[in-house]
Image (cartoon, grey):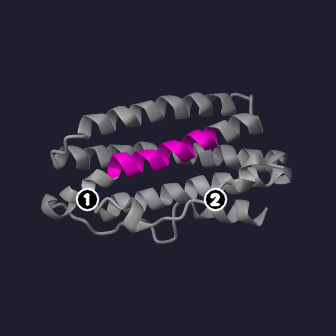
Amino acid sequence: MNSLTTITLLKWDAQHYGTGFAHVDDQHHELFDGLNSLTFFLQNASAANDPENQDKVIELLYFLGEYVIRHFQEEEEIFTKCGHPLAEANKEAHQVFYEKYFEYNDKLISGTFSLELLQQLHSFLHSWLLNHILKIDTTLREYAAKSGMNNSSSAEKKGVFAKFLAFFQMK
C-alpha cells in the first residue's frame, strides 16, 4: 500500500490560510492545487510507474518551481511595501525552500527519478507550505486593510494547475 494514501488532499480555506491579500491567497490556493496534483500522482502506484506519467510529473515540478519563484517575488514585495517585521525572515524561509526544492528537483530530472525521492519531495513541500503559510504569511492579515495596495483577486479562474489536476485524477 502506498504511504500517501493516508495523506488528505489540501483544501483551501481562506479563514484559516488567508493573508488578507487576495492575489497572494489566490496564488496559495493554486499551490495547494499543484501539490494535490502531485498527491494524486503518488497515490496511484500503477500510474506512477508509467514513463508518460513520470514525464508529466517532471513537467508539473518544473511548472511548480517557476510558479513558486514568481509567487515568492511578489509576496516578498508585499512584505517589504507593508514594512512587515518578518520581511527578512520570509525571504530567508523562501531561500531555504529554493535550496531544498531544487536539490530534489535536480535529482529527479537528472535521470535518478524514483518514487521514493518524489515522496520525500512531496512530504517536504506539504510540510513547508502549510507551516510557512500558517506561521509567516498569515501575519500579513493585520497589514492588508491599512496597506492601501490593490487587493483584488487576479488569479486565472480556471487555475494554473488545472491541467495537472485533471490529468492525474483521471489516472
Question: Residue 96: x, y in percent?
Answer: 44, 31
Residue 67 visible within the image: no
Near mark 2 (Cα within 10 A), the count class, few <14, some 14-19 or many ≥20, is: few
Image quadrant occupied by the C terminus = bottom right
Question: Residue 157: x, y in percent?
Answer: 46, 71
Identify the secondary structure beneath mark 2: loop
Q: Amino acid at mark 2?
A: Thr
**Rendering quarter of residue 101:** top right
Name the residue tied to disc 2. 8
For the magenta stretch, what is the residue range? 121-137
Residue at left offset 34%, top offset 61%: 23
For this orientation, the residue located farthest to the bottom is 157
Name the residue tied to disc 1. 141
The residues tagged by marks 2 and 1 sit, at their Cα atoms, a distance apart of 26 Å
Residue at left offset 24%, top offset 46%: 79
Near mark 1 (Cα within 10 A), the count class, few <14, some 14-19 or many ≥20, is: few
Q: Contact (CB < 8 A) between labels 2 and 1?
A: no
Left or right: 70 in relation to 115 = left
